Image (spheres, helix red, strand yellow):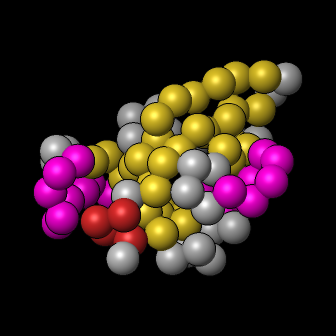
Amino acid sequence: MRATLYKNKSDERYISKDLESIGTYNNLVFKDDEDLVTPTFKVTDSSFSEECNYIYVNELGRYYYIRSRRFSRQCLFLECQVDVLMSF
């Protein structure tokens, strides 16, 4: 899946976010089951930006907060939560 990476500078309660685009990532995949509300995405590219805290997944048409990051066996796992205000 393709994703656009952002640095979110706004409070979560605002509908319109102040987003700074950081770049795109083309190889985003679900870690396990396809949970659209609180997914965990697997990233295998070591150039993934550490400063991003917000992500838009093109194929899903949804914005997500990046809640935490975990490293395991040369992979990065992004634990996310959908931003309902921006997504719908």
x 85%, y 23%: residue: 73
The chief SS type of the magenta part is loop
Residue 47 visible in the current orientation? no
x 61%, y 61%: residue: 36
Position of 80 compared to 72: left or right? left
Of 77 and 44, which appears nearest the observer? Answer: 77
Of 18 and 65, which appears nearest the observer? Answer: 65
Measuring from the top left, give residue 23's x and y in whole percent: 45, 57
Determine the image quadrant of residue 3.
bottom right
Position of 83 compared to 69: left or right? left
- Asked if residue 28 is positioned above or below residue 52 in the image, the reply reads below
x 63%, y 50%: residue: 39
Q: Is residue 55 magenta?
A: no
Determine the image quadrant of residue 19.
bottom left
Position of 6 compared to 29: left or right? left
Measuring from the top left, give residue 80's x and y in whole percent: 53, 45
x 62%, y 68%: residue: 2
Measuring from the top left, give residue 10's x and y in whole percent: 16, 48
Measuring from the top left, give residue 22's x and y in whole percent: 38, 52
Q: Is residue 25 magenta?
A: yes
- Asked if residue 28 is positioned above or below residue 57 in the image, the reply reads above
Q: How many marks?
A: 0
Residue 9 visible in the current orientation? yes
- Asked if residue 37 is positioned above or below residue 41 in the image, the reply reads below
Q: Which residues are magenta?
A: 12-35
Specify the quadrant that holds the C terminus: bottom left
Specify the quadrant that holds the N terminus: bottom right
